[in-house]
Image: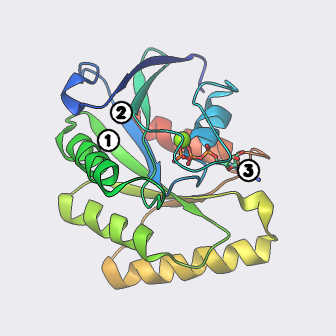
Amino acid sequence: MIQKAEFVVSNTQPEKCPKPDRAEIAFIGRSNVGKSSLINRLTGVKELAKTSQKPGKTQLINHFNINDRWYLVDLPGYGFAKVSKDTKAKWEVMISGYLTGRKNLCGVFILIDSRLPPQEIDLEFLLWCGTEGIPAVLVFTKADKLSKSQVDKNVKAFLKKTEEIFEEAPDYFVTSAEKGTGKDELTTFIEELVNE
Ligand code: GTP
Ligand code: MG
């Protein structure tokens, strides 16, 4: 159970992140997919992570202290068309530097919009995690926006695509930050991961 959740620090430089002395997990995914909203829902702290209707809100590596035991990290989104090439390149260096260099990282949660059919950019990112040896878990978001059967169809289609990349399908969760769907299952999974 998440009893305590507080903001620690924001960074552009992975080496300036908090001392890697405890387990850590990170949320990533396309801009606007709902990373920050899901962090707020999981922690039960409404405005812990900043959210926006406009994509490109989270621009830094944000560390949150959970239960004084582990870190939850909110990252900027990828695939945001409106930022300059220069900014995009900087974010890429920052995110890949963080993900490949962070020694205490136990898992990366790739958030995927459950309203869409499989997106190339998400599959590419998942593949990149695989080649870097970064353990990835899929989290489908905004499940409240479609009927269950439509969500199931998109989830199935995405999982089918992952079969072309990996022998074993990644773990996955279907969530809604709006309704709280999947919150308990995802929290339990994360807690097992950080306690291993
Ligand atoms: P960036 O920081 O820009 O990369 O975006 P983000 O992935 O952190 O998304 P954010 O949490 O800021 O949410 C983007 C928009 O989607 C906001 O308007 C949220 O209210 C909305 N949103 C997020 N999750 C859900 C959800 O589960 N259901 C619904 N209906 N809307 C959601
Ligand atoms: Mg965000």
Amino acid type of disc 3? Thr
Q: Quadrant of the C terminus?
A: top left
Q: Nearer the viewer, residue 139 or 59?
A: 59
* The residue at label 2 has a CB less than 8 Å from ligand 2: no
Q: Which quadrant of the picture is home to ligand 2?
A: top right
Q: Name the residue: 67% across, 24% down.
A: 45
* The residue at label 3 has a CB less than 8 Å from ligand 1: yes
Of the numbered discs in the image, which one, if any, rests on residue 181? 3
* Mark 1 residue crowding within 10 angstroms, few (<14) / some (14–19) / many (20+): some
Residue under numbered circle 2: 24
Query: Are the residues flagged by discs 3 and 2 in contact, CB closer than 8 Å?
Result: no
Across and down, in percent, residue 42 comes to 63, 35
* Mark 3 residue crowding within 10 angstroms, few (<14) / some (14–19) / many (20+): some
Quarter of image, res 144: bottom right
Q: Is residue 184 left or right of residue 26?
A: right
Q: How many marks?
A: 3
Check the image and report above or below for 94 versus 160. Answer: above
Across and down, in percent, residue 110 comes to 45, 56
Q: Nearer the viewer, residue 147 or 117?
A: 117
Amino acid type of disc 1? Cys
Across and down, in percent, residue 68 comes to 44, 14
| Secondary structure of residue under mark 2 | strand
Residue under numbered circle 1: 106
Q: Is residue 46 left or right of residue 148?
A: left
Amino acid type of disc 2? Glu
Q: CA distance from mark 1 to mark 2?
A: 6 Å
| Secondary structure of residue under mark 3 | loop
Q: Is residue 177 left or right of residue 61?
A: right
Q: Name the residue: 49% across, 18% down.
A: 7
Query: Are the residues flagged by discs 1 and 2 in contact, CB closer than 8 Å?
Result: yes
